[in-house]
Image: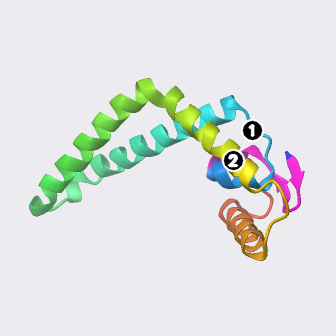
Amino acid sequence: MIISRYGPITFRHFQDNPYWAAAAGYDFNYFDCLSASTQVMSNVASGAWDEVVALPDTEVRYLPAFTIKVTMATILLAILTFSYPILALVIHMRCKTGREKYKGPHNSTVTNNMNVWLRRCEHKWGRNYG
């Protein structure tokens, strides 16, 4: 946990939005970015599974869209299975850029956006997310 000018920034914040957590002062490393890239893969798999579970309730006219969604998700999962370290490198470089960009004093818009993001995280996770 890092105490920044916006309050405590934890790994959970990094999982929610790596760029904003880095800009807020989270001390990230490549393994944090690997975790964020595997979370992308998990989100794709979860979305595809939700589509498959909803198949019995799908109308016939939506079957082509269902087929395209599930096929694309399967292809994306196959690609992400082997390329998530490259995605982690992209996330790492993007976070380094964000940290450098917002290194100094922030203007009121950036401060307001960070505070809103932190409030939304707190609301999403509950008050005592620690």
Q: Is residue 34 left or right of residue 104?
A: left
Q: Which residues are magenta?
A: 2-15
Magenta span includes 13: yes
Q: Is residue 54 left or right of residue 13?
A: left
Residue 84 rendering spot, x and y as whole percentages:
49, 30
Colouring used for the render: rainbow
Residue located 31% across and 49% down the image: 53
In the rendered view, tell whether residue 63 sits above or below residue 72: below
Q: Is residue 77 left or right of residue 41?
A: left
Residue 14 visible within the image: yes
Determine the secondary structure under disc 1.
loop
In the rendered view, tell whether residue 122 sits above or below residue 12: below
Which of the two discs, 1 and 2, sits closer to the camera?
A: 1
Q: Which residue is mark 1?
A: 28
Looking at the figure, which quarter contains the N terminus? top right
The image quarter containing residue 108 is bottom right
Instruction: Specify the label residue 20 is tagged with.
Output: none
Closer-to-camera residue (3/55): 3
- Pointers 1 and 2 in contact (CB under 8 A)? yes
Residue located 20% across and 52% down the image: 66
Residue located 87% across and 55% down the image: 4
Closer-to-camera residue (108/42): 108
Q: Which residue is mark 2?
A: 14
Assess disc 1: are there few (<14), some (14-19) or many (≥20) residues with their C-alpha within 10 Å of its C-alpha: some
Determine the secondary structure under disc 2.
helix
Residue 110 rendering spot, x and y as whole percentages:
73, 69
Three-letter amino acid code of the residue under disc 1 = Phe
